[in-house]
Image (tube, rainbow, N blue to C red):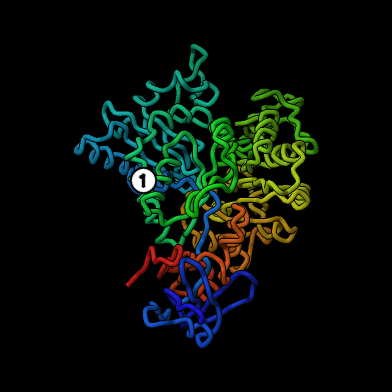
């Protein structure tokens, strides 16, 4: 006799996403797994005396969302510290920081005044926050405002004086040179200069646990059942395992360790995909370039607002410019961005990771950086078994898309970045109109057969916002259908984490990780997909978020 289900969701519009057009009306769950998918009549036989039955009243059931690239503690920090993501001007950002300063001063539990997530590209005064702005926040306390992409931060005079000696000079912005030949720092720092900032503001274990709990609750509220977290110099792995041991994790965590941890990971014998049902070892995460917002992504053509750059041989991944110097044509190579990890070092990282049976996730935004990452994977003799990943891939040439299709490398991308591809947005400023419409070419990648996984990079952590952005994208090669977008945020993300046997579709035998939406993303106005509410989120058969 078939055992009764623990939970049955019925009278639903179930999209399995195993096949693009496959639907059902009910799902039965038992012992944390899906045991039946089908009609109300077929699945109804699974209901016993003690089975909980939820009438979904026509709501949409999907596999739970898996965010393939995020920074979970940062999500929590935005919820706890000053959230600058909604500030519409430098003045409002300063007001939010000042409010946080007053709050922490009253409690006396924080020295640093911190804000996260500002994006100047939407301000009428389109400029970074400066030390002059932040000096107005507090007298005598260090103040830091981190830009949304986390590749740039703004510091007040106190923070800058405290940390400047630890920062590489080339990553500290300065104003026009003065009479003595040296400009004054503006308070804006990028890339390697942020290492000193992160070290100074690193939360202790108790604080990080507070951030993770806040972020986990928010993720579940948005229908997220799993994340691939990018971890660097943090207590996060210990916090995740503590919560797992205590039975308090409601997210499946895949830890992608930064290259700082590569030696330790190798010594401990950790391998990709090892771990528990809730916490697993993922990839080794590395940079190649920076960000478009900070003008540090490595491009083959100059930034539209910083003309002039050197040459790059895309074929073999070799840079013909001197590092941070001049190109062969005498132009400034910095106008095309900068290396955070140069191609030679990247090849070494990939080789060392492969020796230890570890996946590699390479941050590469500009087309030069993507070419360098592919060259590193190719030089290491990647077979596809490693399932290496390129994170972001915002600027791609046709040749690079062909190479990606041939390589079996997963593109782990962020559909929410398309908010910057709109007319007059960040990409228009940095890249120009032609390249803004050729950024984030998700449709072209999918048509070429490139494995595509979606995440948020916590900008923001909201899968339905990302789906809305890619479904309504302004460029034909950027746009995806609702189904394809949802598949990239479910089965595609599961595939990027070698988890397609457990997650990503609604099928018997898969883990009972589901999201129930109040409305159908196929039925609403595409521009309103991001406004759809999550009714329930289920992880391992347990309801971790649910409206009454």
Closest to the observer: 18 or 264? Answer: 264
Whole-percent x and y of residue 475? 65, 59
Closest to the observer: 520 or 164? Answer: 520
Q: Is residue 127 left or right of residue 273?
A: left
Q: Name the outermost residue toward the left.
A: 106
Q: Residue shown at 73%/51% (left/top)?
A: 408
Q: Name the outermost residue toward the bottom.
A: 41
Q: Name the outermost residue toward the top.
A: 180
Whole-percent x and y of residue 456? 52, 52
Closest to the observer: 264 or 537? Answer: 264
Element under disc 1: helix
**Quadrant holding the C terminus:** bottom left
Q: Is residue 347 above or below residue 391?
A: above
Q: State how many labels appear.
A: 1
Q: Is residue 88 visible?
A: no
Q: Residue shown at 61%/46% (left/top)?
A: 391
Whole-percent x and y of residue 49? 37, 82
Classify 10 Å Cα crowding around label 1: few (below 14), some (14-19), many (20 and above).
many
Whole-percent x and y of residue 51? 39, 78
Q: Is residue 157 above or below residue 460?
A: above
Q: Is residue 316 left or right of residue 272?
A: right
Kindly identify which residue carries mark 1.
211
Q: Name the outermost residue toward the front.
A: 1
Closest to the observer: 361 or 509? Answer: 509
Q: Residue shown at 34%/70% (left/top)?
A: 547
Q: Is residue 38 left or right of residue 434?
A: left
Q: Residue shown at 41%/37% (left/top)?
A: 235
Q: Is residue 474 visible?
A: yes
């Amino acid at each position: 006799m078939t055992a009764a289900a623990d939970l049955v969701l019925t009278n639903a519009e179930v999209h399995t996403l195993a096949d693009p057009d496959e639907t059902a009306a009910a799902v039965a769950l038992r012992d944390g797994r899906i045991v039946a998918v089908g009609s109300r009549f077929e699945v109804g036989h699974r209901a016993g005396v003690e089975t909980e039955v939820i009438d979904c009243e026509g709501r949409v059931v999907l596999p739970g969302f898996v965010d393939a690239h995020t920074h979970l503690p940062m999500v929590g920090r935005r919820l706890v510290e000053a959230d600058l993501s909604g500030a519409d001007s430098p003045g409002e950002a300063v007001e939010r920081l000042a409010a946080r300063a007053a709050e922490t001063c009253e409690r006396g539990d924080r020295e640093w005044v911190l804000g996260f997530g500002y994006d100047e590209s939407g301000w009428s005064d389109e400029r970074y926050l400066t030390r002059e702005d932040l000096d107005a926040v507090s007298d005598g306390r260090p103040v830091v405002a981190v830009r949304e992409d986390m590749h740039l931060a703004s510091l007040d005079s106190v923070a800058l004086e405290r940390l400047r000696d630890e920062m590489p000079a080339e990553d500290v912005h300065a104003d026009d040179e003065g009479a003595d030949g040296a400009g004054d720092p503006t308070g804006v720092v990028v890339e390697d200069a942020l290492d000193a900032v992160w070290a100074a503001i690193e939360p202790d274990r108790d604080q990080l646990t507070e951030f993770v709990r806040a972020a986990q609750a928010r993720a579940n509220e948005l229908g997220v059942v799993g994340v691939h977290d990018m971890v660097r110099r943090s207590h996060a792995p210990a916090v995740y395992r503590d919560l797992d041991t205590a039975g308090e994790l409601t997210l499946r965590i895949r830890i992608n360790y930064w290259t700082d941890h590569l030696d330790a990971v190798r010594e401990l014998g950790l391998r990709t995909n090892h771990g528990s049902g809730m916490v697993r070892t993922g990839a080794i995460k590395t940079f190649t370039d920076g960000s478009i917002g900070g003008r540090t992504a490595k491009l083959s053509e100059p930034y539209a607002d910083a003309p002039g750059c050197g040459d790059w041989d895309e074929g073999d991944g070799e840079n013909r410019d001197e590092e941070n110097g001049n190109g062969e044509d005498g132009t400034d190579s910095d106008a095309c961005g900068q290396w955070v990890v140069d191609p030679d070092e990247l090849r070494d990282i990939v080789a060392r990771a492969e020796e230890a049976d570890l996946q590699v996730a390479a941050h590469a935004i500009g087309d030069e950086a993507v070419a360098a990452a592919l060259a590193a994977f190719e030089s290491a003799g990647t077979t596809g078994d490693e399932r290496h990943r390129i994170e972001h891939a915002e600027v791609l040439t046709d040749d690079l898309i062909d190479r990606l299709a041939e390589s079996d490398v997963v593109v782990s991308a962020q559909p929410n970045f398309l908010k910057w591809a709109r007319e007059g947005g960040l990409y228009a400023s940095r890249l120009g109109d032609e390249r803004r419409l050729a950024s984030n070419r998700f449709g072209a990648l999918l048509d070429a057969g490139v494995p595509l996984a979606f995440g948020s990079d916590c900008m923001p952590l909201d899968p339905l916002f990302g789906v809305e952005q890619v479904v309504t994208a302004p460029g034909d090669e950027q746009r995806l259908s609702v189904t394809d977008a949802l598949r990239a945020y479910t089965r595609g993300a599961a595939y990027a984490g070698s988890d397609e046997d457990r997650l990503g579709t609604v099928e018997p035998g898969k883990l009972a990780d589901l999201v129930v939406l109040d409305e159908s993303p196929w039925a609403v106005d595409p521009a309103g997909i991001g406004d759809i509410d999550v009714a329930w989120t289920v992880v391992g058969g347990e309801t971790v978020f649910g409206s009454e």
